Image: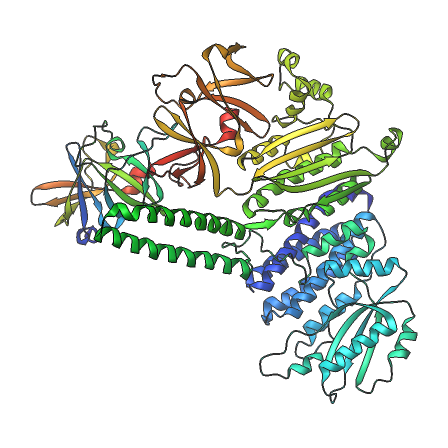
Amino acid sequence: MSSLQKEQYIELAVGAETCAIRIEEIHEIIKMLSITDIPFTRNEVKGVVNLRGKVVCVMSLRNLLGMADEPYTRNTRIIVVNYREEFVGLIVDKVNKVTTYAEIHPPAGGHNRSREAVFHGIGQRDDQLIGILKLEEILGG
Amino acid sequence: MMMELSAYRDIFIEELNEQLERIDQSLLTLEHAPAPELVQTIFRAAHTIKGSASTMGFREMSDLTHEVEYALEWVREKKPEITAKLIDTLFRALDAMKLLRTQYISGGDYADCSAVVAEIKALINQPAEPQPVRLPVLSPAEMLLAEEAVAAGYSLLSLAVTLKEECLMKAARYYMLLQRIEDVCGKVIAVALPAAAAAGADEDSRYSRFAVVAAAGKEIQQISEQLAGDSDVQSIVITPFVPGPSSVIGAAAAVEPLLAGPPSSPNKEQRGNSAQPTVRVSVERLDHLMNLVGELLIEQTSLADLSAAGQRNDPAKVLPGIGGVSDHMGTIIKELQEGVMKTRMLPMDQLFNRFPRLVRDLAHKLGKEIELVIRGGETELDRMIIEELSDPLIHLIRNSTDHGIESPEVRAERGKSPKGMITLTSFHEENQVVIRLEDDGQGIDAVRIKASALSKGIITEEQAGFLTAQEAIHLIFEPGFSTAAEVSEVSGRGVGMDIVRSQIGRLNGIIDIETVPGQGTVFIIRLPLTLAIIKGLLVNVSGRVLILPMYNVAEIVRISPEDIQIVQGEQAIINHGRIVPLSWLRDKLHYPRTERSSKTIPLVIVRSVDRIAAFAVDEIIGNQEVVIKSLGAYLGTMNHLSGATILGNGRVALILDASYLVSH
C-alpha cells in the first residue's frame, strides 16, 4: 500500500459518500455538457458527449455505486478518465480537491461485501475515511 | 494419382491455393520490409505444401517445394541481405509452383522445373559469385505481347548476353545490341538488367550482363549465327523461354495469376496482414492537398484581419467580409475533403483481379464453360469497402457459376451457346458505386425458391400465398436457405446468401435482383463511395436529432393517420403499390411519446440490401454531410447504431443503422 500513499488523488462526492480517484487515471474534469442518450443501453450509461470533437461515453457514478440518479446541479462534474485506451466520463455530484493520504487501509469487509471489490483501499486523513475507487472494477464490472 | 486419395484432391487444391496465396503475399511484403517472421511464414507454407503434395503423390510439386524450403532455410540460417534477386528467384519458384498447380488441376503433363531449381541452387551455393542475369519476369502487358507473338507463330526465346570486360560505353552497346536483337529475331518483349549499381560503382557496368526475352520467327541456331561476331560481346546464350503459368491458360485468365505475383506487377498493395496498413498516394494528389491547406491558411489570415478590424471599428461592417471568407473556406474544405477521400480510394481491379482465376477454377471443377468479362475495373472505391466486398462478391460469383450457368449440354439443348457468360461491371452513378454481376444462366425460379423455403420452414404456407415472385426471389437471402442439392465446397465454408446480405448491409449497400427464368440473372449492388463521411438525413424524434444514412433513404413521404393500414396485425402503408411495414421510430428506440401538432405524419422509407420499411418521425430537419465517429469500444456492440456525429451546435447525434432498422 505504500505506493498508493505517495500518489495524489481527486476527492469527489456522490450522494453522502466521498470517494477518490488516482490523479494519474484522470484525463480532465469538465462541467456538465449536454448528453445524447443512447437507446438500448444499461441504465448507468447516460449517453455520449462531445469532448472537443471526440465522442465520449458518460456513465453515472451514482448508478455504478448503486445509488439512484439525482437532478444535475451547478456542482455536477464529468470526470473524464482513461480506461482501456479510451476516454470514459463519470458523472459525479461534486469535485472537492486534490489530496494525498497519510495512511491507506485495505478495503473494509463490513456489511456490504459486494462493494469491497470496487475500492483499492480506504484513505485516511485526520479522522476522515475516503474510499479509493478501482476504475477497472467499476467500469469493467 | 492414387485412387483412394482422390477424395482429398479438392481439399488439397484448396489448401494449396491458400498456401500459394500466403507465399505470394508474404513475398510481396518481404520485398518492401524484410522481416524474419515473413521468411518463417513462407517457410511454413512451403513446408505444408511439400507435406501434402507428397501425401497426394504429387512428386513434381513436393520436389520443387523441397528446393524452395531448402532455400528458405538457408535464408533463415544465414540471414543474407534480402536482395531483389533473392525475391525474384523465390517469385519464379512460386510461379513454377503455380504452374504445377494449374497443370495438376487440369490433369496435364508437368512442366520441367529444373531451371528454377538450378537457379535456387545457384543462389544458395555461390552467393558471392555474380550470377547469370535472371530472366525477366513478364508484366501483364508484356505477357499479352508474348501471347500475341506466340499466336502469330513466333517462338519465345531468352537471350543472356554478357559484354566483354574491356568494352567501353556499355550502356550504348546495350542499346545497340537490343536494336540488333530486334532486327534479327523480330520483337523484343522484355529486358532484365541487374539492379542499379551500388553508390559509387560504375553505372556503366550495370549493362555488362543482361537478359532479353524476344519473339523470334527463326531457329535458335540461325539467330545465334547472325548475332555472333560482335567484338564487344563475350557471349550470348539463347534458350527457349518458358513464361509463367499463363502459357497453358486462355488469354483472359492468363494475366490474373501473374498480377498477384511478379515484382514488376502494379499489384504491390500490402494486404491487411501488417499491423499498420499503408497507403500509396501519388505525389500529385498530395501536392493538391498541400495547395488546399495553403489556401486555407491564407483564408485564416484574412479572418484574423477581419476580426481585428471588427474590434477596432464597427463589427457590423466586417460581417459581409466574414461571410465571404466563410463561403470560400467552405469551398476549400469541400475540395480538401474530396482530396483526402481520394487517398483512401483503390481501383476496383484490386478486387476484380482475383475473379478470373476463381471462375476458371470453378468452371473446371463443375465441368462448365464460362467466360468472365470484367468491365470498369478502374472505378475507385474506399479501400475499406473494397476489402469488405471480397467475400460477398466471391459468394455471388460462386453462386452464378454453380447455380446460374448451366452445363454445356443443357445450354445446347436450350439453344444457348455452350459457353456461359458472366459479366462483372462497376461504374459510378451519382454518389455511389454500382456493381453489376450478370450471368446468362438459367435464372432464378421463384416457384422453386418458394417451395424450397416452405420445405425448410423459412416461410409458412400462408406467407407463401402472399409472396410475389420478386419477394420470393429475395428469400435466397434468408438464413438457412440453399437450393443446392449437395453440400458443395461453397456451402461447406459456412458462407450463405444471408452473409452476403449482412455484409452488404454493413456497408450501407443495397442489392437488387433482376432475373428472367431461362435467360439469366443480374445482381445489382449499390454502395456508398466511402464510409468515413456520409450524407445523412436529419430527423427529429422525441426532441432528439437522429441521422439516417441518405443512401438508405428511398423516399420521404407525408401521410395522414387514415393512410395507415393494419395488415396481419402490423401497421403498414401502401407505397408505390406495395405493402411497406410501418413503425414509429420513437417506439422502436423506446423514446418517450411527444405531442404531435401537425395533422400529417412525416415518413422516411428506408431501404437496406433488399428490405424496405417505413418509419414515422416527428419532423424532417434536412440533409447534410456528416462525419461518422465511432462510439468507442466501451459501449460494446451497438447493432442499432452505425456511429455518431457532432452537429453544428456541438451536440452529438446518433446515426442509425439502416440494416438494423429494416430487419428488427
Seen in the image, is B180 located left or right of residue A88? right
Seen in the image, is B153 located left or right of residue B332? right
Quarter of the image for residue B482 reads: top right
Which is more toward the observer, B505 or B131? Answer: B505
The color scheme shown is rainbow
The number of numbered discs placed on residues in the rendered structure image is 0
Say if residue A117 shows up in the picture. Answer: no
**Picture coordinates of residue B397, whole percent (x, y):** 70, 38
**Picture coordinates of residue B472, whole percent (x, y):** 66, 21
Quarter of the image for residue B596 reads: top left
Quarter of the image for residue B496 reads: top right
At a point 25% along the width and 29% down the height, the residue shown is A66
Residue, far bottom: B166
Seen in the image, is A59 located left or right of residue B64? left
Say if residue B609 shows up in the picture. Answer: yes
Which is more toward the observer, B441 or B606? Answer: B606
At a point 32% along the width and 28% down the height, the residue shown is A43
At a point 69% along the width and 77% down the height, the residue shown is B126
Which is more toward the observer, B640 or B308? Answer: B308
**Picture coordinates of residue B23, whole percent (x, y):** 65, 56
Which is more toward the observer, B629 or B360? Answer: B629
Task: Give the answer, above or below, for where B167 lies relative to B4.
Answer: below
Residue, far left: A126
**Picture coordinates of residue B404, whole percent (x, y):** 75, 32
Task: Give the answer, above or below, for where B32 lies relative to A89.
Answer: below
